[in-house]
Protein backbone atom coordinates (compact mmCIF):
# COMPACT_ATOMS: atom_id res chain seq x y z
CA UNK A 1 0.00 0.00 0.00
CA UNK A 2 1.50 3.40 -0.98
CA UNK A 3 2.53 5.73 1.85
CA UNK A 4 0.00 8.41 2.78
CA UNK A 5 2.59 11.12 3.46
CA UNK A 6 6.16 11.84 2.44
CA UNK A 7 8.94 11.65 5.03
CA UNK A 8 9.83 15.20 3.97
CA UNK A 9 6.42 16.56 5.02
CA UNK A 10 3.48 17.86 3.00
CA UNK A 11 1.79 21.08 1.95
CA UNK A 12 -0.53 22.39 4.64
CA UNK A 13 -3.20 23.38 2.10
CA UNK A 14 -4.16 22.76 -1.52
CA UNK A 15 -3.52 26.46 -2.18
CA UNK A 16 0.07 26.04 -0.99
CA UNK A 17 0.61 23.32 -3.60
CA UNK A 18 -1.00 25.46 -6.33
CA UNK A 19 1.27 28.38 -5.46
CA UNK A 20 4.34 26.11 -5.32
CA UNK A 21 3.59 24.33 -8.61
CA UNK A 22 2.74 27.65 -10.28
CA UNK A 23 5.99 29.06 -8.93
CA UNK A 24 7.83 26.11 -10.46
CA UNK A 25 6.11 26.63 -13.80
CA UNK A 26 6.39 30.42 -13.87
CA UNK A 27 9.98 31.29 -14.71
CA UNK A 28 12.07 33.47 -16.97
CA UNK A 29 10.56 31.74 -20.02
CA UNK A 30 7.04 32.94 -19.12
CA UNK A 31 8.11 36.54 -18.68
CA UNK A 32 10.09 36.95 -21.89
CA UNK A 33 9.91 33.87 -24.15
CA UNK A 34 6.17 33.34 -24.44
CA UNK A 35 5.33 37.01 -25.24
CA UNK A 36 7.89 37.42 -27.99
CA UNK A 37 7.30 34.08 -29.73
CA UNK A 38 3.56 34.77 -29.62
CA UNK A 39 4.08 38.20 -31.15
CA UNK A 40 6.35 36.84 -33.87
CA UNK A 41 4.09 33.92 -34.81
CA UNK A 42 0.61 35.24 -35.36
CA UNK A 43 -0.27 36.84 -32.02
CA UNK A 44 -3.74 35.68 -31.03
CA UNK A 45 -3.63 32.83 -33.54
CA UNK A 46 -0.51 31.48 -31.83
CA UNK A 47 -2.12 31.97 -28.40
CA UNK A 48 -5.15 29.92 -29.50
CA UNK A 49 -2.93 27.07 -30.69
CA UNK A 50 -0.88 27.35 -27.49
CA UNK A 51 -4.01 27.11 -25.32
CA UNK A 52 -5.12 24.06 -27.30
CA UNK A 53 -1.73 22.43 -26.75
CA UNK A 54 -1.89 23.25 -23.02
CA UNK A 55 -5.23 21.46 -22.78
CA UNK A 56 -4.26 18.48 -24.96
CA UNK A 57 -0.66 17.96 -23.81
CA UNK A 58 0.37 20.08 -20.84
CA UNK A 59 -2.59 19.51 -18.52
CA UNK A 60 -2.84 15.71 -19.08
CA UNK A 61 0.90 15.17 -18.53
CA UNK A 62 0.90 17.41 -15.46
CA UNK A 63 -1.94 15.36 -13.96
CA UNK A 64 0.02 12.18 -14.74
CA UNK A 65 3.19 13.49 -13.11
CA UNK A 66 1.36 14.65 -9.96
CA UNK A 67 -0.40 11.27 -9.84
CA UNK A 68 2.96 9.46 -9.86
CA UNK A 69 4.42 11.76 -7.21
CA UNK A 70 1.51 11.43 -4.80
CA UNK A 71 1.31 7.65 -5.22
CA UNK A 72 5.05 7.17 -4.64
CA UNK A 73 5.52 9.81 -1.88
CA UNK A 74 9.31 9.82 -2.41
CA UNK A 75 11.93 11.50 -4.60
CA UNK A 76 11.29 10.90 -8.33
CA UNK A 77 14.00 8.21 -8.54
CA UNK A 78 12.65 6.20 -5.61
CA UNK A 79 9.03 6.88 -6.60
CA UNK A 80 9.48 5.44 -10.09
CA UNK A 81 11.40 2.43 -8.79
CA UNK A 82 8.72 1.75 -6.16
CA UNK A 83 5.83 2.15 -8.60
CA UNK A 84 7.55 -0.12 -11.12
CA UNK A 85 7.80 -2.83 -8.42
CA UNK A 86 4.17 -2.24 -7.45
CA UNK A 87 3.11 -2.83 -11.05
CA UNK A 88 5.39 -5.87 -11.47
CA UNK A 89 7.65 -4.03 -13.94
CA UNK A 90 11.40 -3.83 -14.34
CA UNK A 91 13.29 -1.38 -12.12
CA UNK A 92 14.59 0.22 -15.31
CA UNK A 93 11.53 2.51 -15.15
CA UNK A 94 13.41 4.28 -12.38
CA UNK A 95 15.28 5.97 -15.23
CA UNK A 96 12.36 8.44 -15.45
CA UNK A 97 13.35 9.73 -12.03
CA UNK A 98 17.04 9.82 -12.91
CA UNK A 99 16.31 11.78 -16.09
CA UNK A 100 14.29 14.32 -14.11
CA UNK A 101 16.87 14.75 -11.35
CA UNK A 102 19.72 15.08 -13.87
CA UNK A 103 17.76 17.59 -15.96
CA UNK A 104 16.95 19.67 -12.88
CA UNK A 105 20.58 19.69 -11.73
CA UNK A 106 21.88 20.74 -15.16
CA UNK A 107 19.18 23.39 -15.58
CA UNK A 108 19.88 24.86 -12.15
CA UNK A 109 23.57 25.31 -13.03
CA UNK A 110 22.95 27.69 -15.93
CA UNK A 111 19.55 28.99 -14.77
CA UNK A 112 21.31 30.48 -11.75
CA UNK A 113 23.70 32.30 -14.10
CA UNK A 114 20.86 33.80 -16.15
CA UNK A 115 18.89 34.66 -12.99
CA UNK A 116 22.02 36.49 -11.86
CA UNK A 117 21.60 38.80 -14.85
CA UNK A 118 18.19 39.79 -13.48
CA UNK A 119 19.68 40.43 -10.05
CA UNK A 120 22.33 42.61 -11.65
CA UNK A 121 19.69 44.60 -13.53
CA UNK A 122 17.68 45.18 -10.35
CA UNK A 123 20.63 47.16 -9.01
CA UNK A 124 21.43 48.78 -12.36
CA UNK A 125 17.88 50.09 -12.60
CA UNK A 126 17.56 50.97 -8.91
CA UNK A 127 20.72 53.08 -8.97
CA UNK A 128 19.66 55.02 -12.08
CA UNK A 129 21.72 53.02 -14.54
CA UNK A 130 19.00 53.23 -17.21
CA UNK A 131 18.64 57.03 -17.08
CA UNK A 132 19.76 58.72 -20.29
CA UNK A 133 20.47 55.35 -21.91
CA UNK A 134 20.59 55.13 -25.71
CA UNK A 135 20.58 52.05 -27.97
CA UNK A 136 24.37 51.73 -28.08
CA UNK A 137 24.60 52.27 -24.34
CA UNK A 138 22.02 49.57 -23.61
CA UNK A 139 23.79 47.02 -25.81
CA UNK A 140 27.12 47.95 -24.23
CA UNK A 141 25.69 47.58 -20.73
CA UNK A 142 24.51 44.06 -21.46
CA UNK A 143 27.66 43.14 -23.37
CA UNK A 144 29.93 44.47 -20.64
CA UNK A 145 28.05 42.45 -18.03
CA UNK A 146 28.49 39.22 -20.02
CA UNK A 147 32.18 40.01 -20.54
CA UNK A 148 32.84 40.38 -16.80
CA UNK A 149 33.33 36.90 -15.29
CA UNK A 150 33.89 38.23 -11.76
CA UNK A 151 30.57 40.09 -11.73
CA UNK A 152 28.72 37.13 -13.26
CA UNK A 153 30.26 34.83 -10.63
CA UNK A 154 29.16 37.15 -7.84
CA UNK A 155 25.53 37.29 -9.01
CA UNK A 156 25.49 33.55 -9.76
CA UNK A 157 26.74 32.86 -6.23
CA UNK A 158 24.19 35.17 -4.59
CA UNK A 159 21.29 33.57 -6.45
CA UNK A 160 22.46 30.03 -5.67
CA UNK A 161 22.73 30.91 -1.97
CA UNK A 162 19.21 32.42 -2.08
CA UNK A 163 17.90 29.18 -3.55
CA UNK A 164 19.75 26.90 -1.13
CA UNK A 165 18.61 28.88 1.92
CA UNK A 166 14.95 28.27 1.06
CA UNK A 167 15.29 24.56 0.20
CA UNK A 168 17.41 23.76 3.27
CA UNK A 169 14.57 24.85 5.57
CA UNK A 170 12.27 22.05 4.42
CA UNK A 171 8.84 21.72 2.82
CA UNK A 172 6.70 23.85 5.14
CA UNK A 173 9.27 26.20 6.69
CA UNK A 174 11.19 26.70 3.44
CA UNK A 175 9.37 25.90 0.20
CA UNK A 176 5.80 26.65 1.33
CA UNK A 177 6.68 29.80 3.25
CA UNK A 178 8.67 31.14 0.30
CA UNK A 179 6.00 30.55 -2.35
CA UNK A 180 3.16 31.85 -0.20
CA UNK A 181 5.06 35.15 0.02
CA UNK A 182 6.73 35.34 -3.39
CA UNK A 183 3.87 34.23 -5.65
CA UNK A 184 1.25 36.73 -4.40
CA UNK A 185 3.90 39.47 -4.63
CA UNK A 186 4.71 38.38 -8.18
CA UNK A 187 1.04 38.59 -9.19
CA UNK A 188 0.68 42.01 -7.53
CA UNK A 189 3.77 43.32 -9.33
CA UNK A 190 2.45 41.97 -12.64
CA UNK A 191 -0.88 43.75 -12.12
CA UNK A 192 0.95 46.97 -11.27
CA UNK A 193 3.17 46.62 -14.36
CA UNK A 194 0.13 46.03 -16.61
CA UNK A 195 -1.48 49.13 -15.08
CA UNK A 196 1.69 51.11 -15.76
CA UNK A 197 1.71 49.86 -19.35
CA UNK A 198 -1.90 50.97 -19.77
CA UNK A 199 -1.09 54.50 -18.56
CA UNK A 200 2.36 55.12 -20.02
CA UNK A 201 2.58 52.73 -22.98
CA UNK A 202 0.66 52.07 -26.17
CA UNK A 203 -1.63 49.50 -24.57
CA UNK A 204 -3.92 48.92 -27.55
CA UNK A 205 -0.93 48.45 -29.87
CA UNK A 206 0.62 45.99 -27.40
CA UNK A 207 -2.70 44.16 -27.05
CA UNK A 208 -2.98 43.87 -30.82
CA UNK A 209 0.63 42.67 -31.17
CA UNK A 210 0.11 39.93 -28.60
CA UNK A 211 -3.50 38.87 -29.15
CA UNK A 212 -4.66 39.93 -32.65
CA UNK A 213 -5.04 36.66 -34.58
CA UNK A 214 -2.93 36.76 -37.73
CA UNK A 215 -3.44 33.28 -39.15
CA UNK A 216 -1.20 34.06 -42.14
CA UNK A 217 1.79 34.07 -39.73
CA UNK A 218 0.81 30.73 -38.24
CA UNK A 219 3.25 28.36 -39.95
CA UNK A 220 3.89 24.70 -39.19
CA UNK A 221 6.96 25.79 -37.25
CA UNK A 222 4.78 28.14 -35.18
CA UNK A 223 2.51 25.23 -34.26
CA UNK A 224 5.56 23.23 -33.15
CA UNK A 225 6.74 26.21 -31.11
CA UNK A 226 3.35 26.36 -29.42
CA UNK A 227 3.49 22.62 -28.65
CA UNK A 228 6.98 22.91 -27.23
CA UNK A 229 6.17 26.00 -25.16
CA UNK A 230 3.02 24.35 -23.77
CA UNK A 231 5.09 21.42 -22.52
CA UNK A 232 8.18 23.22 -21.26
CA UNK A 233 6.41 26.12 -19.54
CA UNK A 234 4.84 23.78 -16.97
CA UNK A 235 8.18 22.36 -15.73
CA UNK A 236 7.17 18.89 -16.87
CA UNK A 237 9.65 16.02 -17.13
CA UNK A 238 12.23 17.38 -14.67
CA UNK A 239 10.89 15.81 -11.47
CA UNK A 240 9.83 19.13 -9.91
CA UNK A 241 6.10 18.58 -10.35
CA UNK A 242 6.48 14.93 -9.30
CA UNK A 243 8.23 15.79 -6.02
CA UNK A 244 5.75 18.59 -5.32
CA UNK A 245 2.96 16.08 -6.00
CA UNK A 246 4.46 13.79 -3.38
CA UNK A 247 3.77 16.50 -0.78
CA UNK A 248 0.10 16.88 -1.83
CA UNK A 249 -2.65 15.79 0.56
CA UNK A 250 -4.39 12.52 -0.30
CA UNK A 251 -7.83 14.11 -0.47
CA UNK A 252 -6.88 16.94 -2.86
CA UNK A 253 -8.27 16.74 -6.41
CA UNK A 254 -5.41 16.25 -8.86
CA UNK A 255 -7.57 17.41 -11.78
CA UNK A 256 -8.78 20.66 -10.19
CA UNK A 257 -5.36 21.42 -8.73
CA UNK A 258 -3.62 20.86 -12.08
CA UNK A 259 -6.18 23.03 -13.87
CA UNK A 260 -5.56 25.84 -11.37
CA UNK A 261 -1.79 25.64 -11.92
CA UNK A 262 -2.14 25.59 -15.71
CA UNK A 263 -4.56 28.52 -15.62
CA UNK A 264 -2.30 30.61 -13.37
CA UNK A 265 0.78 29.85 -15.47
CA UNK A 266 -0.99 30.86 -18.69
CA UNK A 267 -2.37 34.02 -17.07
CA UNK A 268 1.12 35.08 -15.98
CA UNK A 269 2.49 34.58 -19.52
CA UNK A 270 -0.26 36.70 -21.10
CA UNK A 271 -0.05 39.39 -18.40
CA UNK A 272 3.72 39.56 -18.94
CA UNK A 273 3.12 40.28 -22.61
CA UNK A 274 0.55 42.97 -21.75
CA UNK A 275 3.10 44.54 -19.40
CA UNK A 276 6.06 44.43 -21.80
CA UNK A 277 4.83 45.22 -25.30
CA UNK A 278 2.88 48.45 -24.62
CA UNK A 279 5.98 49.82 -22.87
CA UNK A 280 8.30 48.80 -25.71
CA UNK A 281 5.99 50.05 -28.45
CA UNK A 282 5.25 53.24 -26.50
CA UNK A 283 8.96 54.03 -26.57
CA UNK A 284 9.03 53.57 -30.35
CA UNK A 285 11.12 50.40 -30.14
CA UNK A 286 10.79 47.11 -32.00
CA UNK A 287 8.91 44.39 -30.14
CA UNK A 288 10.47 41.64 -32.28
CA UNK A 289 13.78 41.48 -30.46
CA UNK A 290 13.68 37.90 -29.23
CA UNK A 291 15.78 37.16 -26.14
CA UNK A 292 17.33 40.65 -26.24
CA UNK A 293 13.93 42.15 -25.49
CA UNK A 294 14.40 41.99 -21.71
CA UNK A 295 18.00 43.05 -21.22
CA UNK A 296 18.57 45.40 -24.16
CA UNK A 297 15.24 46.81 -25.37
CA UNK A 298 13.27 47.17 -22.13
CA UNK A 299 15.94 49.23 -20.32
CA UNK A 300 15.75 51.70 -23.22
CA UNK A 301 11.98 51.91 -22.82
CA UNK A 302 12.20 52.48 -19.06
CA UNK A 303 14.89 55.14 -19.63
CA UNK A 304 12.44 57.41 -21.48
CA UNK A 305 9.27 56.82 -19.48
CA UNK A 306 7.93 58.67 -16.42
CA UNK A 307 8.62 56.57 -13.34
CA UNK A 308 10.91 54.33 -15.36
CA UNK A 309 13.43 54.17 -12.51
CA UNK A 310 10.89 52.64 -10.13
CA UNK A 311 8.96 50.47 -12.55
CA UNK A 312 12.10 49.21 -14.27
CA UNK A 313 13.42 48.12 -10.90
CA UNK A 314 10.08 46.47 -10.07
CA UNK A 315 10.11 44.58 -13.36
CA UNK A 316 13.52 43.04 -12.73
CA UNK A 317 12.57 42.20 -9.13
CA UNK A 318 9.60 40.37 -10.67
CA UNK A 319 12.01 38.46 -12.92
CA UNK A 320 14.13 37.49 -9.91
CA UNK A 321 11.06 36.24 -8.03
CA UNK A 322 9.97 34.15 -11.03
CA UNK A 323 13.45 32.64 -11.34
CA UNK A 324 13.70 32.03 -7.59
CA UNK A 325 10.45 30.07 -7.30
CA UNK A 326 11.48 27.94 -10.28
CA UNK A 327 14.98 27.29 -8.95
CA UNK A 328 13.79 26.00 -5.57
CA UNK A 329 11.57 23.48 -7.35
CA UNK A 330 14.24 22.09 -9.66
CA UNK A 331 16.78 21.52 -6.86
CA UNK A 332 14.23 19.77 -4.60
CA UNK A 333 14.15 16.33 -6.35
CA UNK A 334 17.91 15.84 -6.01
CA UNK A 335 17.90 17.03 -2.39
CA UNK A 336 15.06 14.65 -1.50
CA UNK A 337 16.95 11.73 -3.10
CA UNK A 338 20.10 12.39 -1.05
CA UNK A 339 18.09 12.65 2.17
CA UNK A 340 16.31 9.35 1.42
CA UNK A 341 19.28 7.34 0.19
CA UNK A 342 22.42 8.78 1.78
CA UNK A 343 21.11 9.48 5.28
CA UNK A 344 22.12 13.14 4.97
CA UNK A 345 20.44 15.99 6.77
CA UNK A 346 18.42 18.30 4.54
CA UNK A 347 20.92 21.12 5.07
CA UNK A 348 23.86 18.93 4.02
CA UNK A 349 22.02 17.51 1.00
CA UNK A 350 21.04 21.00 -0.15
CA UNK A 351 24.60 22.24 0.26
CA UNK A 352 26.00 19.36 -1.79
CA UNK A 353 23.60 19.84 -4.72
CA UNK A 354 23.87 23.65 -4.66
CA UNK A 355 27.69 23.59 -4.60
CA UNK A 356 27.79 21.03 -7.43
CA UNK A 357 25.43 23.09 -9.59
CA UNK A 358 27.35 26.24 -8.67
CA UNK A 359 30.62 24.75 -9.90
CA UNK A 360 29.04 23.65 -13.18
CA UNK A 361 27.52 27.12 -13.50
CA UNK A 362 31.01 28.61 -13.38
CA UNK A 363 31.77 26.78 -16.62
CA UNK A 364 28.53 28.12 -18.09
CA UNK A 365 29.32 31.74 -17.23
CA UNK A 366 32.93 31.46 -18.40
CA UNK A 367 31.66 30.22 -21.78
CA UNK A 368 30.22 33.72 -22.25
CA UNK A 369 33.62 35.39 -22.00
CA UNK A 370 37.06 33.86 -21.32
CA UNK A 371 36.09 30.40 -22.62
CA UNK A 372 34.03 31.69 -25.53
CA UNK A 373 36.42 30.15 -28.06
CA UNK A 374 35.93 26.64 -26.63
CA UNK A 375 32.92 24.81 -28.02
CA UNK A 376 31.48 21.30 -28.15
CA UNK A 377 29.17 20.49 -31.06
CA UNK A 378 29.59 24.17 -32.03
CA UNK A 379 28.07 25.30 -28.72
CA UNK A 380 29.49 26.89 -25.59
CA UNK A 381 28.86 25.24 -22.21
CA UNK A 382 25.77 27.32 -21.37
CA UNK A 383 24.17 26.78 -24.77
CA UNK A 384 25.01 23.06 -24.67
CA UNK A 385 23.43 22.63 -21.23
CA UNK A 386 20.34 24.47 -22.44
CA UNK A 387 20.11 22.37 -25.59
CA UNK A 388 20.58 19.00 -23.88
CA UNK A 389 18.01 19.70 -21.17
CA UNK A 390 15.34 21.46 -23.24
CA UNK A 391 15.58 19.32 -26.38
CA UNK A 392 16.53 15.88 -25.03
CA UNK A 393 16.06 15.27 -21.29
CA UNK A 394 12.78 17.10 -20.64
CA UNK A 395 10.83 15.75 -23.64
CA UNK A 396 12.26 12.26 -22.98
CA UNK A 397 11.13 12.44 -19.36
CA UNK A 398 7.67 13.72 -20.29
CA UNK A 399 7.28 11.07 -23.00
CA UNK A 400 8.19 8.26 -20.58
CA UNK A 401 5.83 9.62 -17.91
CA UNK A 402 2.95 9.50 -20.40
CA UNK A 403 3.91 5.98 -21.51
CA UNK A 404 4.25 4.69 -17.94
CA UNK A 405 0.91 6.09 -16.76
CA UNK A 406 -0.95 5.41 -19.99
CA UNK A 407 0.42 1.96 -20.88
CA UNK A 408 2.33 0.36 -18.00
CA UNK A 409 0.34 1.17 -14.86
CA UNK A 410 -2.87 -0.79 -14.39
CA UNK A 411 -5.99 1.26 -14.90
CA UNK A 412 -7.04 0.31 -11.39
CA UNK A 413 -3.91 1.99 -9.95
CA UNK A 414 -4.43 5.06 -12.11
CA UNK A 415 -8.09 5.43 -11.18
CA UNK A 416 -7.51 4.87 -7.47
CA UNK A 417 -4.98 7.73 -7.34
CA UNK A 418 -6.53 10.15 -9.83
CA UNK A 419 -10.07 9.79 -8.44
CA UNK A 420 -11.62 11.64 -11.36
CA UNK A 421 -15.30 11.06 -10.66
CA UNK A 422 -16.77 12.06 -14.02
CA UNK A 423 -16.34 9.00 -16.30
CA UNK A 424 -16.33 11.00 -19.57
CA UNK A 425 -13.61 13.37 -18.30
CA UNK A 426 -11.57 10.39 -17.15
CA UNK A 427 -11.82 8.68 -20.55
CA UNK A 428 -10.85 11.90 -22.34
CA UNK A 429 -7.84 12.40 -20.04
CA UNK A 430 -6.78 8.74 -20.39
CA UNK A 431 -6.99 8.93 -24.18
CA UNK A 432 -4.89 12.12 -24.23
CA UNK A 433 -2.23 10.59 -21.96
CA UNK A 434 -2.06 7.34 -23.93
CA UNK A 435 -2.17 8.62 -27.50
CA UNK A 436 -2.11 12.39 -28.03
CA UNK A 437 0.55 13.50 -25.53
CA UNK A 438 3.22 10.85 -26.35
CA UNK A 439 2.88 11.39 -30.11
CA UNK A 440 2.99 15.19 -29.76
CA UNK A 441 5.97 15.16 -27.39
CA UNK A 442 7.83 12.70 -29.64
CA UNK A 443 7.15 14.91 -32.66
CA UNK A 444 8.44 18.02 -30.88
CA UNK A 445 11.51 16.08 -29.72
CA UNK A 446 12.36 14.79 -33.20
CA UNK A 447 11.87 18.25 -34.64
CA UNK A 448 14.05 19.85 -31.95
CA UNK A 449 16.96 17.50 -32.63
CA UNK A 450 16.42 18.00 -36.38
CA UNK A 451 15.57 14.38 -37.15
CA UNK A 452 12.39 15.40 -39.02
Image: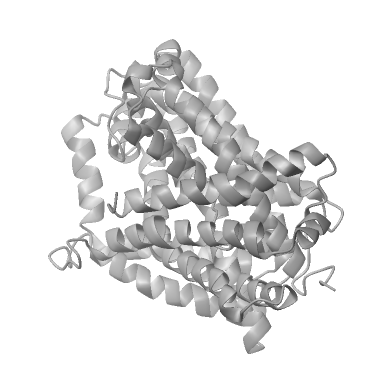
Q: Measuring from the top left, give residue 41's x and y in whole percent.
A: 35, 27
In which quarter of the view is residue 191 placed? Answer: top right
Q: Measuring from the top left, give residue 68's x and y in whole percent.
A: 69, 62
Q: Could one spot residue 320 in this view of the protein?
A: no
Is residue 31 positioned above or below 234 on the image? above
Is residue 136 positioned above or below 102 on the image? above
Residue at 42% across / 33% down in the picture?
Answer: 312
Q: Quadrant of the N terminus?
A: bottom right
Q: Residue furthest left?
A: 373
Residue at 70% across / 64% down in the picture?
Answer: 409
In which quarter of the view is residue 106 placed? Answer: bottom left
Q: How many marks?
A: 0
In which quarter of the view is residue 65 placed? Answer: bottom right
Q: Residue furthest bottom?
A: 343
**Residue 229 in the figure: left or right of residue 5:** left
Q: Measuring from the top left, give residue 168's x and y in whole percent.
A: 63, 71
Residue at 72% across / 72% down in the picture?
Answer: 87
Q: Nearer the viewer, residue 254 or 385?
A: 254
Q: Could one spot residue 153 in this view of the protein?
A: yes
Residue at 78% across / 53% down in the picture?
Answer: 418
Q: Nearer the viewer, residue 6 or 302?
A: 6
Is residue 249 positioned above or below 293 on the image? below
Q: Residue furthest top?
A: 204
Q: How is the image coloured?
A: one colour
Q: Measuring from the top left, give residue 380's x and y in whole percent.
A: 22, 63
**Residue 145 in the figure: left or right of residue 200:** left
Amino acid sequence: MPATTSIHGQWTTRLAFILAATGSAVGLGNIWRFPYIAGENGGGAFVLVYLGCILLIGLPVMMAEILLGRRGRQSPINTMSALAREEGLTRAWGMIGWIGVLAGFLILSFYSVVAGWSLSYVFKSGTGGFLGLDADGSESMFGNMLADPEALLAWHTIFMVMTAMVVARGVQSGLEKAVTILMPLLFVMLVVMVGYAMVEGQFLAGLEFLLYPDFSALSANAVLLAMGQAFFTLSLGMGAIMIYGSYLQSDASIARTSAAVVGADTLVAIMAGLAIFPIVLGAGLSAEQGPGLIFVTLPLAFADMPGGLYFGTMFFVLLVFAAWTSAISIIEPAVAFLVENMGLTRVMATAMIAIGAWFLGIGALLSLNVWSDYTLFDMGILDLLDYVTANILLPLGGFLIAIFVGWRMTERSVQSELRLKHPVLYQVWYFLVRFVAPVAILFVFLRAVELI
